[in-house]
Structure formats: structure tokens, C-alpha cells
């Protein structure tokens, strides 16, 4: 399988794993839900997990790949405030925890660019 065909499936796998993690171990995700969002953090954790699972399915299927990849790029931008909250909350923690939280911030950009590249290299479904 050429790299161009593997990339969407790897992106789908990443989204599926992250989405499943929201349900398997929701507590760490609850902790990074911005307080400005209404309702329960657990609700947002489950909603974002379900969104990631839906995006994974969409990216995995050639017919929906382009739209799902564009939606995934938007999703990666939309969840960036949670990463900022995590970094702010962990600023006084031990160095390894702080490093993980700070390291997540610049990783969001490659995820957005990856999703956009998958969309750009996918032909529109007919």
C-alpha cells in the first residue's frame, strides 16, 4: 500500500484510538474541559470522544474521506483550548507532566496539516 493510501488510515486509527480513550478513561479528559463550556465536563468528554469516532469512520471510508478529513482539521482546532487549559493547569507540576502538557500545544498544528493533506489528496466522492 503506497504511503498516500496509508496516511488516511493512520489518521483514522489515531482518531479512533483517541475517541475510544474518551470512553475507556474519561477522567483525564474531564479535567481539561474548559470551565467556560456549559454543562458537565463528562458530557463534553463523551461528545468529543463520539466526534472522534465518527471522524475516524469518515476518514477511513473513501466516499466520505475528504469531508471527514476537513472536519477533523476543524475538530483539531476546536479542541486546542483544552490543550491550553491542560498546559495552564500543569504549569506548577513536576517537569515531566509540565513537558507533556506543553508538548501537546505545538503538536496540534501538524495534526491540522495532516488532516488537510488527507483532504487535499482525496478525490471528491461521486
Image (cartoon, grey):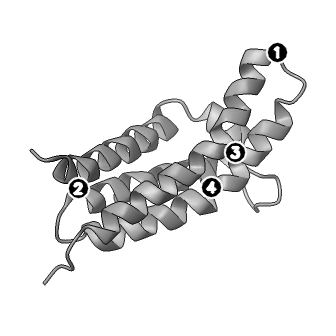
Q: Secondary structure at mark 4?
A: loop
Please tell me which residue is depicted at 65% across the width and 32% down the height of the picture: 28
- The number of numbered discs placed on residues in the rendered structure image is 4
Please tell me which residue is depicted at 76% across the width and 62% down the height of the picture: 38
Residue behind mark 1: 94
Farthest residue toward the left?
1
Residue behind mark 4: 79
Above or below — where is 5 with respect to 103? below
Circles 4 and 3, Cβ within 8 Å, touching? The answer is yes
Q: CA distance from mark 1 to mark 3?
A: 17 Å
Residue neighbourhood size for the residue with mark 1, other residues' Cα within 10 Å, grouped as few (<14), some (14–19), many (≥20): few
Q: Secondary structure at mark 3?
A: helix
The tag earlier along the polypeptide, 4 or 1, is 4
Residue neighbourhood size for the residue with mark 4, other residues' Cα within 10 Å, grouped as few (<14), some (14–19), many (≥20): some
Image quadrant where one finds the N terminus: top left
Residue 9 screen position, x and y as percent: 24, 48
The tag earlier along the polypeptide, 1 or 2, is 2
Left/right of residue 2 with respect to residue 75 in the rendered view: left
Q: Secondary structure at mark 2?
A: helix
Residue 2 screen position, x and y as percent: 13, 47
Residue behind mark 2: 60
Amino acid at each position: 500500500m503506497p504511503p498516500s493510501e496509508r496516511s488516511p488510515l493512520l489518521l483514522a486509527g489515531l482518531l479512533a484510538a483517541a475517541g475510544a480513550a474518551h470512553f475507556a478513561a474519561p477522567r483525564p479528559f474531564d479535567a481539561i474541559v474548559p470551565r467556560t463550556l456549559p454543562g458537565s465536563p463528562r458530557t463534553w468528554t463523551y461528545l468529543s470522544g463520539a466526534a472522534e469516532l465518527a471522524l475516524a469512520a469518515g476518514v477511513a471510508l473513501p466516499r466520505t474521506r475528504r469531508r471527514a478529513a476537513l472536519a477533523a482539521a476543524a475538530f483539531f482546532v476546536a479542541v486546542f483550548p483544552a490543550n491550553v487549559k491542560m498546559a495552564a493547569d500543569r504549569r506548577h507540576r513536576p517537569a515531566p507532566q509540565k513537558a507533556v502538557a506543553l508538548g501537546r500545544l505545538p503538536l496540534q498544528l501538524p495534526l491540522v496539516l495532516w488532516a488537510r493533506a488527507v483532504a487535499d489528496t482525496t478525490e471528491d466522492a461521486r
